[in-house]
Image: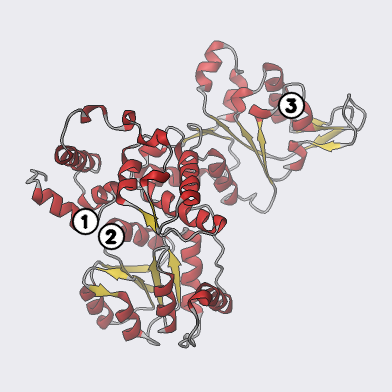
Amino acid sequence: MARILIIEDDAAFAQMLQKFLIRNNFEVLVSHTGADAENKIKEGNLQLVITDLRLPNYDGLDLVSALQGKIPIIVMTGYAEVASAVKAMKMGAYDYISKPFTPDQMLAVIDGALHAKPLEPKVKSTDKNQEKELQVQRAQQGVSSDKTTGLLLVSDATQKLEEYISLVAPTDMSVLIIGESGTGKEVTAKAIHEKSLRKEQPFVALDCGAIPKELASSEFFGHLKGSFTGAIADKIGSFEAANGGTLFLDEVGNLSYENQMQLLRALQERKIKRIGSNKEINVDVRILSATNEDLKAAVEKGTFREDLYHRLNEFSLQIPALKDRHGDLKAFATYFLEKFNGKLGKQVADFSPEVWNVFNTYTWPGNIRELQNVIQRAVLLSTENTIEIHTLPAELLEKKDVPKDFGALSKADFEKEQIINALKKTNYNKSKAAKLLQVTRKTLYNRINYYDLDVL
């Protein structure tokens, strides 16, 4: 069992990463300061060090220099620290990984580091070639630099969701995914498929809300050429296309009653017929469905079949709204910033404090999809190194998104109230509260002392 040391001043993030690596059969130590890390390293018997480059009163590059050639090192960086990452790798670090990263990315880098030969210091390169040089080094080391949409997230709501996904994914149970528009229901469906025994087979998504009821049968089961007006060629339906794999039915509550009956029959018999054909085709598909409607209420009203509801709802997953995923906002925002920097050819490094204040007080009715759109727009409009408040759409700046009890409170009163609310939401865990407020623990302690707040 490999023994790994994590050096990270963010206690909540370090604890989360430690738990993840322990679940993957590593022995993991944690240091929150450079001095403590040096002591643990002196004790020996470490196979790998994972360190943040930015630590209080400590330069992560000094550690890289001191350990060169002795212990493999992975450095964790922010998006704007590519130059520092290049320097670290030239000094002997095995690789770097940008926050936020996916669990699979971290495991891939760790596996490469534990099995790699010592990395020689690199020759000098120009700033323009820094990122290319890193990619070449990664290719030589066998580490993928591809990014996925999965993120290492910290909120309790997300952790519970991930736990449920891991439990239900290996089964063949039908799963009903419930959540507001924009919360990532299809992403969740894909995650279930990728963790299932069917992951090597097709994943087919069908938007039931966009299909006219007259064409639903064709979309489900396919048709033969000439079977109806407009059928100019044979068509394979979604059931047949997903055979052996997973069929995801998005907005399943929008199906007409007749289409519900057809779907139920296919699920019961596990056989389908293309329109215009008498030949039965056996199908083996796992059904994942999603809705932002209350299907129980629809069953009571008689607009959704109760037998179909129970057939689809062998297990249900509730996707939390973005406003309820305390601590995940920063990870999502940073991910989208990096994504649209690459897509739009920009190099915006961060968000201004004023933008973070807006993000943290806005209720995000459009959830993750709205956040993505807001950041894409902001990156496009930005001409500076940081995203400024003038790049945000007007609806984010309207007063209605400020808490109702803000009233005529002064800025100081409002800040005190925000701190107290964050502490209450996190059961007075100051590390989690600091993450929720998007500040460092040191800043939170300073503000608590400044306002002389009576907290546990």
Q: Residue furthest top?
A: 301
Q: Is there CB contact under 8 Å for labels 3 and 2?
A: no
Q: Is residue 175 above or below residue 19?
A: above
Disc 2 marks which amino acid? Asp
What secondary structure is found at the residue carrying circle 1? helix
Q: CA distance from mark 3 to mark 2?
A: 51 Å
Disc 3 marks which amino acid? Ala
Instruction: Let me know if residue 2 appears in the view.
Output: no
Q: Which residue is mark 2?
A: 10
Dot 1 crowding, Cα within 10 Å, few <14, some 14–19, many 20+: some
Disc 1 marks which amino acid? Arg
Q: Residue furthest right?
A: 226
Left or right: 92 with respect to 300? left
What secondary structure is found at the residue carrying circle 2? loop
Q: Which residue is mark 3?
A: 216
Q: Is residue 213 above or below residue 48?
A: above
Mark closer to the chain start, 1 or 3? 3
Residue 240 image position (x, y, % from top left): 77, 39
Residue sitting at x 42%, y 45%: 391
What secondary structure is found at the residue carrying circle 3? helix
Q: CA distance from mark 2 to mark 1?
A: 8 Å
Q: Is there CB contact under 8 Å for labels 1 and 3?
A: no
Q: Which residue is mark 1?
A: 441
Left or right: 308 with respect to 259? left
Q: CA distance from mark 1 to mark 3?
A: 54 Å
Dot 3 crowding, Cα within 10 Å, few <14, some 14–19, many 20+: many
